Image (cartoon, rainbow, N blue to C red):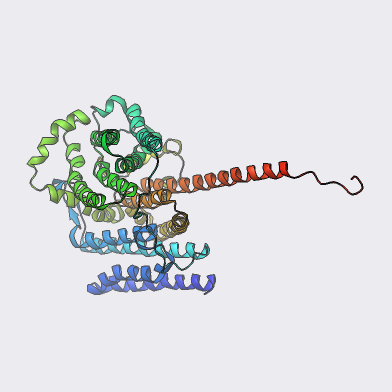
Amino acid sequence: MTTTARGALYGAGVLVTAALTLAAVHAGSALMWLALLGVPLAVAVVVRRRFLDGWVSPLLLVALSLLATAGFGAAFGRSVGADGGVSATLALSDAETVRTALLLAVSATTLLIGGAVALTMLGARDRRDTSRTLLPDSGAFDGDPATRLIVLGVAALPLLATVVVQGPDLLERSTYLIGEAGSAGGIVSMLGLAGAVGCGLVLGSERGVRLLLPITLAAGYLVLFFALGSRRLALLPLLMAVGAHVARPSRATRIGLAAAVVAALVLLPIPLFVRGVGAHGLIPYAEALPGILEQNDILGGAADNLLISFPLVGATAFQVAPLPLDYFFLQVNPLPGSMIGWYDISDSLRINQYTPFSGAGELANYGWGVVVGFWFVVGMFLGTLDHRIGVLLDAGRRGVALVLTALPLVFTILMLQYNLRSGVRMLVYSAAVLLALRAVDALTAVSQRLPHAAQRSCGQSAPTRPGKA
């Protein structure tokens, strides 16, 4: 099939999806929900063979995350209360619930189609019969002790930088948010997640006394995220478990992954609980922590923290006053926030002090044209990532492939529970990794050619001109 024919097919898929979805909304029955969630899943099946297998494909991971949010949110989480362990009371009407599910379904469908178009343009081959995995059966991090020490040092940099930037505010402060650090502080804070993965890599590969260093670093990140009152506290065990499994896959690390999921659910309510104690920082939070045991439903609070995504998307999209379109262009601007005036408007893009608008909901607030355009472009970008990850896996470069798969996952979480700008930054970081990878490959190719060129120049005599012999 030619590229033009495929493009026409994908365009027809968009129109059919829109028609079926609108018809289902008017039907107001079980057919509606079948179309809302079934149509994008059908599109995923149709274009599936263009994507990487299983959970390796960032396109499929992001799309399925959006659909899971729509399905579980509509069924169980159309309303959450602040007394359930979350930071805001949100409730959607029946009509708003349908529109929110429609929004997420359209987002997932458009994303998949954009990705399929990008892969077609890149000439990606049929991948339905391939088998690739990010987590190998044998160790993917077999560096010598010096290499592991370097990785551990790099993983510690975000922690050290945050301590230097924030200083005494980490111990005690009057406000929850520490905004004075600006863009640099935000970037360093997000890089802490990558530092946690690096810590897990070393933790999974070391033995004996040498485990003390990665354990100490892990404890440092635990204290840091707790002092910040950040929900990244819940991600810490999961990211470290993934790193440990990549370093040295075994039955123990697989059990560790399962245990990390449970630990993440248990840790999830803690940041939101300590935010409400009045004073902020490590000391006030530690003093208030025993009070969480008096909560009647800790696990219910953890569930609410997961289910809040759906009503938060809906409230941002359909209950908040229309946002100026200029805000959209400001949020997708990759320049530092201090240069473009982001911190002048960021406080206005919040439900309350602790709950920012949802990026996915902000798109719908700007208009359906913005929703379709944004997710199509993101789909094309993730399609490029999908293609590049396949190339990296074929070359055995699983570490970089893991990073390029993980960043879109973080993007999804941020798009559902944080401002649009927070999610877009993950795409900017992904693009930066791609550019850095290309630069390294180019320099490596040049360095490999230079010795051969020198050998040829030394081993070959200069050609003689006719008549000069």
- The C terminus - image quarter: top right
Name the residue at 65% across, 45% down: 452
- x then y, percent, for residue 165: 35, 28
- x then y, percent, for residue 219: 25, 35
Name the residue at 31% across, 26% down: 167
- x then y, percent, for residue 284: 17, 30
Q: Is residue 64 above or below residue 276?
A: below
Q: Is residue 418 left or right of residue 403?
A: left
Q: Is residue 322 visible?
A: no
How many discs appear? 0
- x then y, percent, for residue 17: 37, 71
> As rendered, which of 53 and 7 lies closer to the eye?
53
> As rendered, which of 408 and 97 lies closer to the eye?
408
Name the residue at 48% across, 49% down: 434
> As rendered, which of 428 and 324 lies closer to the eye?
428
Q: Is residue 64 visible?
A: yes
Q: Quadrant of residue 97?
A: bottom left
> Which residue extends farthest top?
168
> Which residue extends farthest right?
467
Q: Quadrant of residue 56?
A: bottom left
